[in-house]
Image: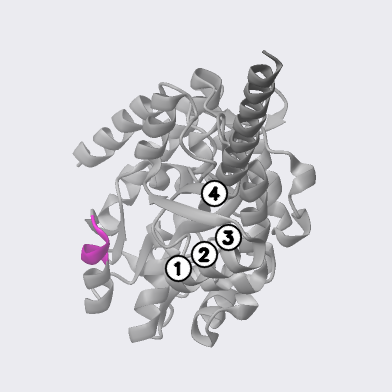
């Protein structure tokens, strides 16, 4: 009887040891849900060698990330990278994330203004759910030899560039023009009446500006061709598009508008049922080192929120970035917050009326 009991106890002990080993093994593997280019093979290899953790990378986009995490209640992954405007809403509705322990983040590695903006835009009930990683902006792409007077979005309506302007009939145009007209649309997000008033003023300005527009561009290639041909000398567009053109045509480049470029940030978040928080924090702190962040920029094409990382990218890209974004212009970026329900319908009506106006 005692012998059987001892065997049973021994078996239970072995089982417990194996279970503990399994949990430890799982905790040593970081299941990363991210975008293409954000976890290059050489960076993963360096991380694994330095930390002993392994990394399993699943590529995705905002819609798929949210869908995967909703389907599992925040399970299946240990670290995800949705854009900052896809965090507070899904968390409040579905509870798919867990709060970030900021004491485990090396905040000195982040550009302060980006870190603070992301913390504010990803907070729910006083808890922070995201920190910034990769970012980009839309602003002005201009031919500096022909449109040097264009310093802000509203300057696209200047007589000096009449008939040679392009922008999209999309919400960034509404937001950008609002800021350049001295209004703060993001501050009015929670006041629909105030936001409608802002949008109606922007609508009037865009209708007034229609004679200046050569074409409303729909795709990046279309805009690139308009700028290369000289048919357009000033436009609203993305930073990377301006830098790409600059490589072929030095007079064309991206310019941060005086009222502020419009910025998006892809973040780091912890899924609610993640099992490898230590590995997740280790990855965040590893890739935010300036030298490592520069390696990600070389692959992804966009810069990161790593402070000083621009010093380690290629000399050509470094020069373009620093010319477009001196520190004061980085701090002046207007980061997209989560969009309240109903505002996009209002914006759509405004854009339809602008398009239909004579």
Q: Nearer the viewer, residue 62 or 329?
A: 62
Q: Please give the name of the residue rendered at 57% of the width and 70% of the height, measured from the top-left corner.
A: 46
Res 355 visible: yes
Query: How did the renderer colour the structure?
Result: one colour
Mark 3 and mark 2 lie on one chain; the one further toward the N terminus is: 2
What's the mark number on residue 44?
A: 2
Observer-side mark, 3 or 2, equals 2
Query: Disc 4 marks which residue?
Result: 30
Which element is circle 3 on?
Answer: loop
Quadrant for residue 199, please give it: top left
Magenta segment: 219-223
Instruction: Residue 182: give x, y in percent of width and height.
Output: 58, 45
Residue underneath mark 1:
41
Q: Is residue 302 above or below residue 7?
A: below
Location of residue 323 in the rendering, given as x and y in whole percent from the top left corner: 57, 77
Q: Residue at x 67, y 17 (%)?
A: 5
Between the C-alphas of marks 4 and 2, the distance is: 11 Å
Q: Is residue 88 above or below residue 313?
A: above
Q: Label 1, label 4: how many angstroms apart (C-alpha)?
A: 14 Å
């Amino acid at each position: 009887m005692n012998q059987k009991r001892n065997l049973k106890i021994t078996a239970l002990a072995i089982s417990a040891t194996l279970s503990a080993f399994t949990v430890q093994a799982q905790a040593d593997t970081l299941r990363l849900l991210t975008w293409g280019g954000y976890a290059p093979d050489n960076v993963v290899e360096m991380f694994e060698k330095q930390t002993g953790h392994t990394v399993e990378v699943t590529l995705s986009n905002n819609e798929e990330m949210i869908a995967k995490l909703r389907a599992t209640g925040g399970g299946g992954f240990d670290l995800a990278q949705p854009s900052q405007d896809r965090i507070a809403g899904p968390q409040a509705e579905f509870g798919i994330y867990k709060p970030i322990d900021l004491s485990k983040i090396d905040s000195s590695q982040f550009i302060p203004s980006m870190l603070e903006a992301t913390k504010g835009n990803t907070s729910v009930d006083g808890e922070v759910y995201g920190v910034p990683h990769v970012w980009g902006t839309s602003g002005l792409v201009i031919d500096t030899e022909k449109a040097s007077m264009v310093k802000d979005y509203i300057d696209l309506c200047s007589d000096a560039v009449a008939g040679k302007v392009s922008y999209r009939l999309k919400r960034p145009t509404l937001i950008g023009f609002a800021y350049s007209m001295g209004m703060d649309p993001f501050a009015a997000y929670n006041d629909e009446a105030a936001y409608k008033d802002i949008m109606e003023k922007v609508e009037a300005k865009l209708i007034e500006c229609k004679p200046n527009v050569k074409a409303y561009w729909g795709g990046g290639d279309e805009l690139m061709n308009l700028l290369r041909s000289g048919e357009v000398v000033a436009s609203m567009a993305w930073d990377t598009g301006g830098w790409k053109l600059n490589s072929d045509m030095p007079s064309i480049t991206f310019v941060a508008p005086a009222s502020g470029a419009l910025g998006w940030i892809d973040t780091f978040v912890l899924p609610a049922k993640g099992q490898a928080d230590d590995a997740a924090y280790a990855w965040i702190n590893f890739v935010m080192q300036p030298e490592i962040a520069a390696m990600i920029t070389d692959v992804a094409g966009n810069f990161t929120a790593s402070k000083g990382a621009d010093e380690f990218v290629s000399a050509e890209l470094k020069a373009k970035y620093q010319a477009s974004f001196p520190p004061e212009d980085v701090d002046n970026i207007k980061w997209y917050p989560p969009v309240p329900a109903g505002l996009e319908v209002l914006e759509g009506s405004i854009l339809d009326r602008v398009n239909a106006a004579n």
